[in-house]
Image (cartoon, rainbow, N blue to C red):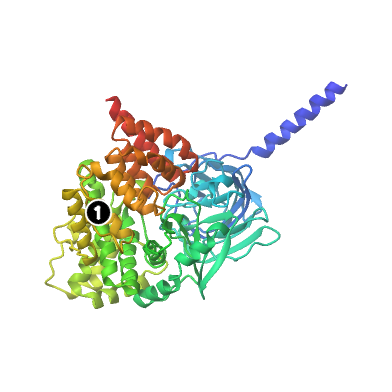
Amino acid sequence: MLNFFKISIILSISSSLFFACSHREIKVMPEIKLNNHSYSNFDSITIKHIHLDLSVDFNKKRLVGKAVLDIINPSTCHYLILDTRHLDIQKVKLNDSAETAWSMTEDQNHFGQALVIELSKNTQSVAVYYKTQPDAEALMWLEPEQTFGKQHPFMFTQSQAILARTWMPCMDVPSMKMTYSADIRCDKKYLALMSAENTFEKNNKGVYHFEMPQPVPSYLFALSVGNIEFRSLGNNCGVFAEPEMIEKSAYEFQDLSKMIQSAEELYGPYAWGRYDILVLPPSFPFGGMENPRLTFATPTIIAGDKSLVALVAHELAHSWSGNLVTNSTWNDFWLNEGFTVYFEERIMEKIYGKDYSDMLAKLSLEELKLTLDDFMRTAPGDTKLKLNLNNRNPDDGVSDIAYVKGCMFLRFLEMQVGRKAWDNFLNQYFNHFKWKSVTTETFLSYLDENLLSKYKNLNLNINEWVYEIGLPKNCPNIESKYLIQVEKSATLLNTQKNPKTIDTSGYTTHHWLHLFRNLNHDSIKNIMTELDTLYQLSNSQNAEIQCDWYRLCIKNEYKDAYPQIENYLIQVGRRKFLKPLYEALSETPDGLIFAKKVFEKAKAGYHSVSRNTIQSILDDNDSSNIQ
């Protein structure tokens, strides 16, 4: 009798679990097509607003809850199609009441799966109940030892370019802009922050409400949770960081209020209310991410001398170019980044002077030329401003082509029409396309109608700039008086091979970078130890200087620096620094062995964006060695 009851209970539980997990599938699936890196039917249905109601589970490394999407369905489509990737969908309700049929397509690499939802005639909102996976690519779950404080875990998202679909169901395209709100639940020891209206202190409930009243695309949705403090830097700006980094961060960003004021003087009022910065732990893969109202920043810019704050100017500039006016597709990425680099340079010029700004621009142009040399051999098509990333991961388009070639194109246009006319046009452009997304063709048409048509005799070669490979011959040349003496010092070192013959007094980060990049590594092979001892370069705490010095060390097989290189690769997660060092190491069999050993130690602390890039470098070099 007892066995019978045991069996009955087991069957009852099993039956309950089956019905709880099962759902009604869609009988006849609509046609699913990949468009602008998305499976969603964004060209038929509009998402007005998303409300996220999520709990943060550090133990299971999951977000659990629901996303409620308010939609406009003018053509009365029978289905809503959303982008997802590895989301555990539990149920879907219409108007947050009746459950409806839904199905998912097969997973397709980085594009993920289409979530197809059956709609009724009067559907105004769709609630998707779901869980994220522990390895969701947008989510970085840090163990306490991976943070500055070493006591508490930390979580942050990185949604650009198409990773938002790994932590929420959405139309993951930059052309779909929507407002959002959220209720986030976490342990009361932590503060939750989003790219929205934030509070500045923890509360005793661990429940935080957010509102983003301005429309943004999915890649600008952002969330972070951890042991975080705040320091005000002005009436509408401040910095968040772990307690161990908050004072250093506040010092580094003292000029933030001036930057905002300078940007507004150039291109109109700041449209987002507050501008705050969150300094993340080292595993953040980028220099910064322009999440509106809350820029995410790498700690590698905390140099102690404010020499790397151009990155803050860059992310602030995105508040106009990228966030306010957004590239409509990832093929138009240069519209976000080229404009932003140009705007960044103008902010830096306004605050720190033209000579300083020109020094930064000169360094960027030199880096661009190196990238072009590489790409012209390996992927010449990716040197165009207007990219073709169809059926490719849009992350493949992230290089300084979009950033610096795009900026040089805008510099060129400014030179042709004059700064006053150019600034008037840019103000008009930002105001006209405010809260909208544009394509390259839309911009060029607007440029011609509202500016260039007034200048009939200009020979601009715009098609060459935008649609052809390489760098046009009429690219502006940039000179920097600050760097001329550095070039003379580099020549002395290359020829006389005596570090004591050069004067480095007054050197900033940028002087050192220019020196390293003008040294012939073969010429200085025998003076690496002397250079290192004299200037303590291997023990530098400046991430930019470390990266370029370590690259010289690898080229010269200066093994005394390898312990510091290993430590650097483990501690730093920024892809800009990791990529060139792993590439340099992978050029020799011994270096590749060392790189693979370090990667195994370091990869758990890398974000998926960095981890995937480095894994690809190592795999490619493994294949070439086999051949």
Work out which quarter of the rendered image holds the C terminus and state it: top left
User: Crowding near pointer 1: few (<14 within 10 Å), some, many (20+)?
Assistant: few
Query: Which residue is outermost to the front?
Result: 500
Location of residue 20 with respect to 191 vertically, above or below:
above
Report the number of discs. 1
Location of residue 44 with respect to 607 vertically, above or below:
below
Note whether residue 536 is visible.
yes
Note whether residue 277 is visible.
no
Please name the residue shown 61% across and 40% down the image: 24
Q: Is residue 554 left or right of residue 57?
A: left
Quadrant position of residue 588: top left
Q: Is residue 386 left or right of residue 64?
A: left
Please name the residue shown 34% across and 43% down the image: 581
Please name the residue shown 38% across and 33% down the image: 594
| Residue in front for this viewpoint, 199 or 326 | 199
Please name the residue shown 28% across and 44% down the image: 528
Work out which quarter of the rendered image holds the N terminus and state it: top right
Question: Percent from the top left, x then y, of residue 450?
Answer: 25, 73
| Residue in front for this viewpoint, 501 or 620 | 501
The local secondary structure at tag 1 comes to helix
| Residue in front for this viewpoint, 83 or 118 | 83
Question: Percent from the top left, x then y, of residue 428?
Answer: 32, 74
Quadrant position of residue 10: top right
Q: Is residue 88 left or right of residue 395?
A: right
The residue carrying mark 1 is: 500
| Residue in front for this viewpoint, 13 or 299 | 299
What amino acid type is highlighted by mark number 1? Lys
Query: Which residue is outermost to the right?
Result: 1
